Image (tube, grey):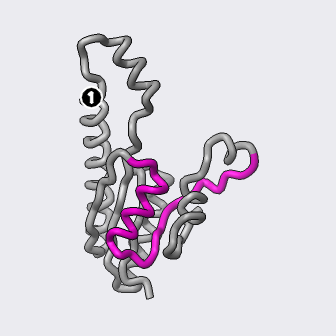
Amino acid sequence: MYSHILIATDGSEFANNGLDHGLALAKALGSRATIVTVTEPWHTLELAREIQAHPGRNPLDDFEKAAAAAAERTLNAAAATAAKNGVAAETVHIHGEHPAPGIIKAAEDRGCSLIVMASHGRRGLQRLMLGSQAAEVVAHSKIPVLIIR
């Protein structure tokens, strides 16, 4: 049924709960697993402030390097967890996308049959203020989504 599972993570302890569940499901079903992390684009206002604060320096290069290094750490740790659990997993870094669309696109591009991700389960004003990537993925994905709380 779920032959290829995409597992989304940002490397946080909270997201690792979703990673663990996704890997356990992939192992139980004998499914392929792809682990994805998404690096958001740098906001234009922040970039402008940095350029103004440090003339002659290209802060975008620093941001790109830091984002790539963080994604590499996240994916290396996730791959090690997958290996420890006996699951062969591909890792993917989606760069310069907002998380929800990046996760959905990665799943569609790779022919995944299920997306697994963690959610804080925020409600009310807190959800409105902080947003919910999980809710956005659920709302826009054409494939099933398993949310781990």
Which picture quadrant has residue 35? bottom left
117 vs 124, left or right, is left
Q: Is residue 59 above or below residue 120?
A: above
Magenta span? 97-124
Which x, y percent locates residue 136? 57, 58
Image quadrant in which the N terminus is located: bottom left
Image quadrant in which the C terminus is located: bottom right
117 vs 40, left or right, is right
**In the image, residue 99 lies in the stretch drawn in magenta:** yes
Which x, y percent locates residue 117? 49, 63
The amino acid marked with disc number 1 is: Asp
Given residues 75 and 106, the one toward you in this image is 106
Q: Residue at x 26, y 67 (%)?
A: 90
Q: Which residue is mark 1?
A: 62
Which picture quadrant has residue 7? bottom left
Which x, y percent locates residue 58? 25, 22
121 vs 90, left or right, is right
Q: Residue at x 60, y 59 (%)?
A: 135
43 vs 60, left or right, is right
